[in-house]
Image: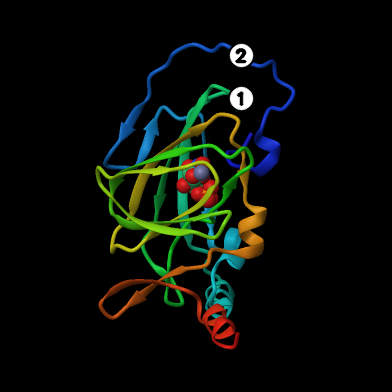
Amino acid sequence: MDGNTGDAEIDHDAAVFVASRPFQVMLDFAAGSLTPFSGSFVRHLSDMASSYEDQEAVKKVLASGDDPVIYKSYYPDVPKQPRHMAFLTTTIEPGTVGSEFHMTRGHHHYRDSAELYVGMFGEGIMIMESRQGDFVQEELVARALIYVPPGWAHRTVNTGSGPLSFLAAYFGDAGHDYGSIDKTGFSRRVYRGDDGPQVRRPESIARAEDQL
Ligand code: PAN
Ligand code: ZN
């Protein structure tokens, strides 16, 4: 099965715990991959077109016949069940769509549970938002560990000039809820500014709030 496919990925019918054997894989800090890996997925711009604010910019790129790779992930074969720990590497290519930096689609977990991010190389920002609307941003760079508590949606943004690569470890039965983020988005987005990255509310939301 493809990785991170939403609710379908959780093995609801499985016995409470399925034993599996210990294994070792190598983390490639140069390529941002795992060796060996049992699965991988690539997200192109067309796979997450609606995630970006500037829809004119998205249309322009896709109409030119280009469909750039935004990020690629590698994962080992870990049961998607309680008490297992899944992990995945992700490498986000540098660039912007309009003035918004390349980023992951972002998600909640169906089963609210914690996640640990480990920066491997590159420069980025993780934006996180609780179900109550609290917002936190943290820098994701080599050797940074970012702890995402249960109930916080998360998205990773590449603000650097080269690829951003990281490892994320999460509960086997966490599941990935993309729908709620696709619907509501995050309250902030990350833009290329004259003096570096800017994390701010999208213009459309800021305008609506001014009118309240
Ligand atoms: C990460 C993400 C990965 C890709 O492993 O799944 O970076 O981002 P999207 O899943 O938002 O496309 C993670 O947070 N796993 O739970
Ligand atoms: Zn996650």
Give the SS element for disc 2.
loop
In three-dimensional space, the C-alpha distance between marks 1 and 2, rounded to whole angstroms, equals 8 Å
Q: Quadrant of the C terminus?
A: bottom right
Taking the image as shown, residue 61 lies to the left or right of residue 148, namely right
Q: Quadrant of the N terminus?
A: top right
Q: Is residue 99 above or below residue 28?
A: below
Q: Which mark is residue 18?
A: 2
Residue type at mark 1: give it: Gln
Taking the image as shown, residue 136 lies to the left or right of residue 8, namely left
- Along the viewing direction, whichever of 113 and 7 lies nearer the viewer: 113
- Along the viewing direction, whichever of 54 and 69 lies nearer the viewer: 54
Q: Which mark is residue 81?
A: 1
Q: Residue at x 69, y 40 (%)?
A: 7
- Residue 150 is situated, as x and y percent measured from the top left of the image, at 52, 41
Label 1 environment density (alpha carbons within 10 Å; few <14, some 14–19, many ≥20):
many
- Residue 176 is situated, as x and y percent measured from the top left of the image, at 60, 43
Determine which quarter of the picture holds residue 195: bottom left
Give the SS element for disc 1.
loop
Q: Residue at x 48, y 62 (%)?
A: 68
- Along the viewing direction, whichever of 38 and 114 lies nearer the viewer: 114
Q: Residue at x 54, y 21 (%)?
A: 83
